Image (cartoon, helix red, strand yellow):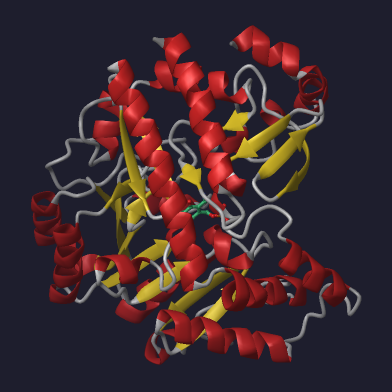
């Protein structure tokens, strides 16, 4: 498969070799590293992407979940193209940023909102707000949960087992962990907990609870495949946060593109602060931090700093407005869930038929194949139980036949957009059958 991949993608390789001399690993985001080389894409439409060698793929990466509207969505692009004639950025607010603020606060049920561009910026503001609001400095986060590329929340992201602490013991994380870029003073302010383990959280809160400004989580952990919070665990987190007067933050950078009202719709639990991003911008850089008036009014000149040249730029704002009002509707999202279920069912049938040591987890328009029969509830489970080898072979086997089955990283998942079709799912399963037979 590796040599077939290389044979099919010589131009990608050529460009990558050149790029590698100009930027580390030949990628501008670490999550794009792929062996033997990453694909270089040229264009995209609907559910399809084309690489520089002219190969066509059915894509389930959907820009790491940023494209639930689909690639080059015609409704969105037509409108944004027209908008572009009015200028790209003003450095002032617009009437549309007011309209979008209304749409977003109503949809997710919060008093106020602040816009920025990326998920990382959103989570940064969320924890800053929580620390100022509570006068506390510590953050409780979960092992393997990713909240963006910034120091504090990088603690406990994708640790290898050597560096992971005991899952049941309240603990802070060693200095500089995991990349030796987090200063000790910062790392000491982060307590890392195992996901889906109420007992461990109780122990941790007994020790650190009165210093914890916020508990931050991905409600469905999606930087280790797809690991939803158990519903009673989520209820427990809300309760224990209240008990210790800590705030609950939902990092919905990915989940805001899954349900109309985001994770609160699925779990029946409402956070104090919600960070939405990726899919709600329809493929344009856009993030929103939502909270009560009391909390968000802490932001302001000589109060909690929050600024950004590109914040609420008219193109992203318009794209988000069209996306939320016309495209990510309840019925369109329900359609993506249905296709996602069909894909999951098809994969499950193949796994059963071939007797593979694997299982599928699917939630809403996301899903993944774990090459393990065991249930995956924590990062530790993921590292210990899931086999990387078969995942890699599987991915390559699919890619050389024109299907990118999920973001090309084994801790990611598939995203079904509103532009995927039943025919796409069928084609994908036909190819999956062939690859599975070869793997067998
Ligand atoms: N939070 C979550 C849950 C994410 O998955 C990501 C990105 N994959 C981020 C935050 C960071 O978002 P961005 O890359 O837009 O900064």
Q: Position of 409 compared to 132: left or right?
A: right
Residue 277: percent from left, percent from top? 54, 64
Residue 102: percent from left, percent from top? 55, 89
Question: In the rendered view, would you say 55 is above or below 417?
Answer: above
Residue 107 can be seen, yes or no? yes
Q: Residue furthest right?
A: 85
In this rendered view, identify the residue nearer to me: 423 or 116.
Answer: 423
Q: Residue at x 48, y 31 (%)?
A: 429
The image quadrant where one finds the C terminus is top left
Residue 344: percent from left, percent from top? 38, 40
Answer with the quarter of the image where residue 291 lies. bottom left
The image quadrant where one finds the N terminus is top right
Answer with the quarter of the image where residue 110 lies. bottom left
Q: Residue at x 12, y 74 (%)?
A: 243
Question: In the rendered view, would you say 207 is above or below 109?
Answer: above
Residue 65: percent from left, percent from top? 54, 51
């Amino acid at each position: 498969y590796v040599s077939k991949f290389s044979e099919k993608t010589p131009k990608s390789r050529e460009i990558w070799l050149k790029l590698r001399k100009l930027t580390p690993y030949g990628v501008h985001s670490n999550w794009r590293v792929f062996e033997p080389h990453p694909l270089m894409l040229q264009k995209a439409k609907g559910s399809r992407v084309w690489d520089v060698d002219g190969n066509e793929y059915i894509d389930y990466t959907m820009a790491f979940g940023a494209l639930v509207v689909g690639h080059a969505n015609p409704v969105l692009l037509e409108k944004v193209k027209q908008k572009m004639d009015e200028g790209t950025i003003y450095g002032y607010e617009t009437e549309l940023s007011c309209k979008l603020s209304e749409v977003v606060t109503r949809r997710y049920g919060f008093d106020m909102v602040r816009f920025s561009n990326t998920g990382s910026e959103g989570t940064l503001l969320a924890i800053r707000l929580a620390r100022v609001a509570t006068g506390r400095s510590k953050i409780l986060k979960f092992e393997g949960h990713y909240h963006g590329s910034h120091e504090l929340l990088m603690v406990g992201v994708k640790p290898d087992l050597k560096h992971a602490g005991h899952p049941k013991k309240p603990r802070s994380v060693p200095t500089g962990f995991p990349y030796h870029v987090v200063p000790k003073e910062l790392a000491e302010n982060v307590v890392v907990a195992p996901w889906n383990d109420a007992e461990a959280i109780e122990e941790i809160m007994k020790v650190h609870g009165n210093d914890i400004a916020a508990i931050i989580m991905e409600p469905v952990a999606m930087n280790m495949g797809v690991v939803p919070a158990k519903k009673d665990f989520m209820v427990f987190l809300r309760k224990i946060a209240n008990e210790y007067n800590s705030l609950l933050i939902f990092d919905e950078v990915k989940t805001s593109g899954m349900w109309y009202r985001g994770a609160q719709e699925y779990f029946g639990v409402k956070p104090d602060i919600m960070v939405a991003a990726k899919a709600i911008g329809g493929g344009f850089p856009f993030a929103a931090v939502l909270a009560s008036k009391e909390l968000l009014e802490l932001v302001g000149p000589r109060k909690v700093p929050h600024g950004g040249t590109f914040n609420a730029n008219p193109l992203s704002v318009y794209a988000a407005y069209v996306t939320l009002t016309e495209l990510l509707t309840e019925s369109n999202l329900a359609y993506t869930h249905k296709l996602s279920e069909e894909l999951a069912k098809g994969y499950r049938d193949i796994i059963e038929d071939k007797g593979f040591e694997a299982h599928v987890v699917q939630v809403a328009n996301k899903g993944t194949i774990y090459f393990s029969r065991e249930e995956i509830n924590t990062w530790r489970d993921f590292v210990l139980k899931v086999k990387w080898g078969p995942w890699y072979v599987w991915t390559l086997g699919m890619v050389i036949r024109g299907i990118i089955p999920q973001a090309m990283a084994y801790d990611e998942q598939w995203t079904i957009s509103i532009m995927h079709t039943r025919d796409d799912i069928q084609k994908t399963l036909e190819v999956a059958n062939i690859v599975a037979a070869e793997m067998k």
